[in-house]
Amino acid sequence: MKKFSCWTLFASFCLAVPLSFVAGAVQAQNYPNKPVRLVVPWPAGGGTDTSARMFAQPLSERLGQPIVIENKPGAGGNIGSAVVAQEKPDGYTLLQGSAAPHGINPHLYKNLGFEPIKDFTFIAHSYSVPSFLVVPANSPFKTAQELVDYGKANPGKLNFGSSGIGTGHHLYSIMFMNAAGFEAVHIPYKGGSPMETALVAGQIDFSLDPPTCLPFIQAGKMRVLGVASKVRNAALPDVPTLDEQGIPNVYSSTYFGLLGPANMPKDVVDRLNKEMNAIIQSDDMRARLTKMGAEPGKGTSEEFRAFAEAELKRFEVLVKNSGADKIE
């Protein structure tokens, strides 16, 4: 048997390492050379799915390859996210990420099936959406303060709706009530659409609803009393923030972005981040985001990851304040 000295093995290792880096660089330069799969961990036709497709088309054009949408809904976004976490980090399987599986769910579920930050590459922050304080069109309340004053004077007589325990509707409504100093009865529904239908019908008194409520507001079926953000929303510029109405620090921003499995090649991540930011900053996309009440994202992959880490901590406090972390 031929014997190898330690020096021979060391020399072989030194040659192999640079070659591996060269191979990785070549792969990144050729990316993508086949269709890219984009997993959406929510049902087809919903708001998250629609926005994923809105970005997929221009991204496909800029990459020169088809982007194939694959819906894998379930467990509040956990199922589809877990699938992507296990995939090869070569840039050919991506995820439509959001605050639910990476910010809220880690504080609600005992077993996610993934680590919300560590198991993913945070590629680009697409956009964020605030919530609007909405009431039925025939509600007696014309301002946020009128609603608050009634709630304080009549404990337990108001109710608010959500798309389920621990969802953004629930957490942000609790945040609003804590800031304003009153309590109301929580009525959870199985999804945002049933909740909005109930609010339009006057079965619930108010909710902190994302921009899916805009068509109802514009059609005169809901009345908006305020926006839960630091600045007014471009889709409804005449609606004051809750800050402006004396109810401070009620900020309900929920983020969405492009993710992939952990340890993706840096060149691939940089390419995707560059293309996504170019799309976000385009006049067409900014107009579409403004129309849907969204705030355009921005920044590097590293900045997006740091932002997601901060949001994970922020949602921990919101979930605890809501009591949702005590739900089995």
Image (tube, rainbow, N blue to C red):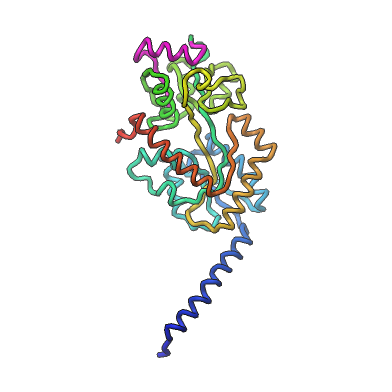
Q: Residue 267 in the image: state x and y as whole percent.
A: 59, 58
Residue 137, magenta (yes or no): no
Q: Residue furthest bottom?
A: 1
Q: Is residue 198 visible?
A: no
Q: Which residues are magenta?
A: 141-162
The residue depicted at 57 percent of the width and 24 percent of the height is 214
Of residues 287 and 52, which is closer to you in this image?
287
Name the residue at 63% across, 29% down.
Answer: 291
Q: Is residue 288 left or right of residue 7?
A: right
Q: Is residue 154 magenta?
A: yes
Q: Is residue 279 at least partly visible in the picture?
A: yes
Percent position of residue 75, x then y? 40, 40
Q: Indicate left or right for 321 with 146 as reference.
A: left
- Judge by depth and name the residue closer to the eye, 253 or 202: 253
The structure residue drawn at horizontal position 48% and vertical position 27%, both measured from the top left corner, is: 193
Give the camera-side residue of 77 and 14.
Answer: 14
Q: Where's residue 300, x and y in %?
A: 57, 48
Q: Quadrant of the N terminus?
A: bottom left
User: Which image quadrant: the C terminus?
Assistant: top left
Position of residue 135 measured from the top left corner of the image (x, y, whole percent): 49, 17
Reply above or below: 114 against 197: below
